[in-house]
Image: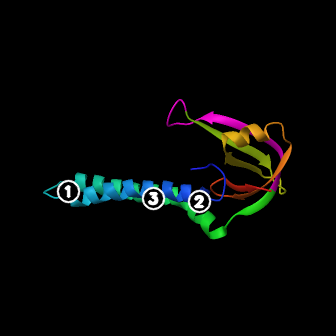
Amino acid sequence: MPKTGVLIMVDELCDVLAIWTVCIYVIVKIIKSRGKISGSVKVARILVIAACVMIGVLFTRSTALDLVSGPETTQLTDIQVSRSQAHTSIFSLHYYLTGTDSQGERVRLEISGDDYTRLSGSNSVTVEYYRHTGRIVRYL
């Protein structure tokens, strides 16, 4: 999926769906495992179920807030582009655009490798983006 563009929320929703699928799978496995169990095992099961729900909610929060509030437009000044190695592989990189918006707040947005090359050396850019997930819909 692209790092920027109109389909970025589809990518975010796929991520949320994957997290919830794993969480629900673990919860169902815990609930279905029956038999005589001690009190400490019951407590452990409850804690694991609670942790799964909390993880699901934490990963869903930003996407849900962005779907409700929609994208916003801002001009970023004093921009910098950076890249960092992803946690998934030594061959995977993430690219970021960081700039100051009109209220003086620093904003960090995920961009593609092509955007990284294109924006290197720029001083400002106007973007339409989702605030909570840090994803750019389009450049204006």
Answer whether labels 3 and 1 touch (C-beta < 8 Å). Answer: no
Residue bearing the label numbered 3? 17
Instruction: Identify the residue at the far left of this view.
Output: 36
Residue bearing the label numbered 1? 33
The kind of residue tagged 3 is: Leu
Q: Residue at x 67, y 35 (%)?
A: 83
Q: Nearer the viewer, residue 103 or 76?
A: 76
Secondary structure at numbered mark 1: loop
- Secondary structure character of the magenta stretch overall: strand
Q: Residue at x 26, y 56 (%)?
A: 30
In 3D space, how far apart are the residues under numbered discs 2 and 3 (Cα atoms)?
A: 12 Å
| First reached walking from the N terminus: tag 1 or tag 2 | 2
**Relative vertical location of residue 24 with respect to residue 80 in this rendering, above or below:** below
Q: Residue 38 in the image: x percent, y percent?
A: 18, 54
Q: Is residue 82 magenta?
A: yes
Residue bearing the label numbered 2? 9
Colour mode of the rendering: rainbow
Find the magenta span and give its range: 75-91
Q: Is residue 67 left or right of residue 21?
A: right
The kind of residue tagged 1 is: Ser
Using the image, tell me which numbered label, if any, was put on residue 4: none
Comparing labels 1 and 2, the label whose residue is closer to the camera:
2
The kind of residue tagged 2 is: Met
Secondary structure at numbered mark 3: helix
Instruction: Identify the residue at the far top of this view.
Output: 90
For mark 1, does the 10 Å Cα neighbourhood hold few (<14), some (14 to 19), or many (20 or more) residues? few
| First reached walking from the N terminus: tag 3 or tag 1 | 3
For mark 3, does the 10 Å Cα neighbourhood hold few (<14), some (14 to 19), or many (20 or more) residues? some
| First reached walking from the N terminus: tag 2 or tag 3 | 2
Q: Is residue 48 left or right of residue 116?
A: left
Based on the displayed image, in which of its 4 quarters is residue 123 positioned? top right
Q: Residue at x 78, y 41 (%)?
A: 119
